[in-house]
Amino acid sequence: AQSVTQLGSHVSVSEGALVLLRCNYSSSVPPYLFWYVQYPNQGLQLLLKYTSAATLVKGINGFEAEFKKSETSFHLTKPSAHMSDAAEYFCAVSGRGRTSYDKVIFGPGTSLSVIP
Amino acid sequence: KAGVTQTPRYLIKTRGQQVTLSCSPISGHRSVSWYQQTPGQGLQFLFEYFSETQRNKGNFPGRFSGRQFSNSRSEMNVSTLELGDSALYLCASSPASPGLTNYGYTFGSGTRLTVV
C-alpha cells in the first residue's frame, strides 16, 4: 500500500527566498507522484506530476520537483517565493494501475507562509 | 471549458438529518472521486465512480454513499449526520478510467458541510 509523508506541517519563508517542501513516499512499486496546491476556500489544483519520464518535473507558477528513487522523495522547490505562493501544499501518490483499484493517497499537507 | 462544479457551496444541517451533495465533472471526464477534508484527518478518500459503477471505496461507514449518472454527474449522500461529519467535501474528476492514475485530478471548490 502506498503512503505519503510531508515533513513540516508549516513552513515560513521570506519573499524572494527558496521554497522547499518535503515529500517522502512509500510504495512497493514505482509510483506516480503529484503535488497539489490549495488556496483558502478552494479545491486543490494540480501543480505538477511525475509519471516516469524525466525525474525533474516542471510545473506551473515556477515550481518544480525531483523524483529520487534512492531517497523515495519528491520534494517541491521554487527558487524565489512570491506572496501569492502562500497556500496549503499536498503531495500525493498513486499506483501505476497494476490493479484496477489504485487510488490517489494524499499527504497531510504543508502550509506555506511567505513573509514580506 | 467549464471546471468541476460542486453544489451547494455551503450547507448547515442538524444531527440526524441526511444530506446530498452534487458534483458535475469536466465535460468528457468519466471518473469522479470524492474526498473528505478535515483539519484533523486531512484528505480522506471516500469513493470513486466510473461509468456509473463504484470502482473503489475508502474506509467510511455505510452512512456514506454515492452514485453516478449516465452523464457522469455524481452525488454523494450522508445519512444520519453526526457532528464529526462536518468537513469540506471535495469532488475530483479525471479523464482516465480507474487504474490509469497518471492524469491527475481536477478538483471542484468543494461543499462545506457543517453539522450542528
Image: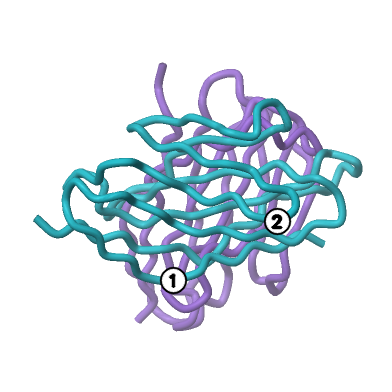
Indicate whether A63 appears above or below B88.
above
Indicate whether A56 appears above or below B38.
above
Which residue is rendered at x = 26% and y = 64% of the image?
A12
Indicate whether B76 appears above or below B72.
below
Give the cyan chain's letter. A
Give the purple chain's letter. B
Give the amino acid at mark 1: Gly
Which residue is rendered at x = 59% and y = 49% of the image?
A74
Seen from the viewer's position, the closer of residues B9 and A113 is A113
Question: Would you name the residue on which mark 1 appears?
Answer: A8
Which residue is rendered at x = 40% and y = 22% of the image?
B2
The quarter holding residue B79 reads bottom right
Q: Chain of mark 1?
A: A
Estimate how packed mark 1 is, as few (under 14), some (14 to 19) or many (20 or more) residues with alpha carbons within 10 Å: some
The image quadrant where one finds the N terminus of chain B is top left
Does B109 sit left or right of B56 as displayed?
left
Seen from the viewer's position, the closer of residues B32 and A99 is A99
Element type where label 1 sits in the image: loop
Question: Would you name the residue on which mark 2 appears?
Answer: A72
Give the amino acid at mark 2: Thr
Estimate how packed mark 2 is, as few (under 14), some (14 to 19) or many (20 or more) residues with alpha carbons within 10 Å: some
